[in-house]
Image: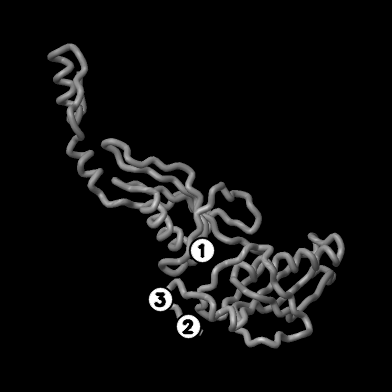
Amino acid sequence: MRFPFSHFPLALCALLTGTGCTTTGPSRAQEVLLKRPPAVFVKERTASLSPRPAGCAVEFVKQDLTGARHTRRVARLELSGSGLDRQQAEKLLSENACRVGAERVFIESEEYGRQGERDEVEAIAFAFDTPVQISHSGILANLASKPPDCRLAILRTKQPEARYQELAGLHLKLESHFQTGGSNHQVRAMQELRAAACHLGADAVLITQESYDMPTLGSVVSGTAIVFDENLRREAPKNPDAHTL
């Protein structure tokens, strides 16, 4: 009867005594494993997004957002480490969520304080999803995102009287096969532009182009997401390296 070398002490004990043998402490391999620093592994990556700045804001949500509107599943994150707690886990998961371009994290399972074993945390990272093409202006305002249905001014003919900064250009094309009437196209377009602008932390959208129900082309809407200077001054920059406007 042959035994793997690693099992030789236990096998010898069983042959000599006719019973099984138990160990009195962790093996050398276990001790080495327990001393390894915590690590987060990115698994099941389903979207390739640009990394967000280090220290970016990440929201931990209480429910799985898979399938939610305006939400894209980015990756599964698996954290392994010794002596962890929820606060440390969130910090490590946030760092990796920023690296994969995610903004929200749902912790599926977590086990801390396991005797002789590493703590394990499994989570899912999510990002904002929109059919709107967003062309960032380059302004590093570091604005906080707002809910998709946030209060937002849609301006078509009148320019705002208050001073403002342009955050991003917005462009949306709805294919002709979607249309069930011009009014529905317009409603859908405004909902999508609003959600994208709210996500950017904007105060208003200046509409620059609206064309609905064009034969074979569908509908095209473009605009500019803006933020008023007064509100910019109220924003406390989360990144010490961000430019102050």
Identify the residue at image location x=20%, y=14%. Answer: 19
The residue mark sitting in front, 2 or 1, is 2
**Identity, as a three-letter code, of the amino acid under mark 3:** Pro
Residue under pointer 1: 49
Q: CA distance from mark 2 to mark 3?
A: 10 Å
Residue under pointer 3: 240
Q: Is residue 121 above or below residue 116?
A: below
Are there few (<14), some (14-19), or many (20+) residues within 10 Å of tag 1? few
Sequence-earlier tag: 2 or 1? 1
Q: Position of residue 169 (x, y in %)?
A: 64, 78
Q: Quadrant of residue 168?
A: bottom right
Color theme of the render: one colour
Q: Is residue 92 above or below residue 53?
A: above
Q: Nearer the viewer, residue 189 or 219?
A: 189
Q: Position of residue 94 (x, y in %)?
A: 43, 58
**Identity, as a three-letter code, of the amino acid under mark 2:** Thr
Sequence-earlier tag: 1 or 3? 1
Left or right: 167 in relation to 109: right
Q: CA distance from mark 2 to mark 1?
A: 26 Å
Residue under pointer 2: 244
**Identity, as a three-letter code, of the amino acid under mark 1:** Leu
Callout 1: helix, strand or loop? loop
Identify the residue at image location x=48%, y=75%. Answer: 236
Furthest-left residue in this view = 16
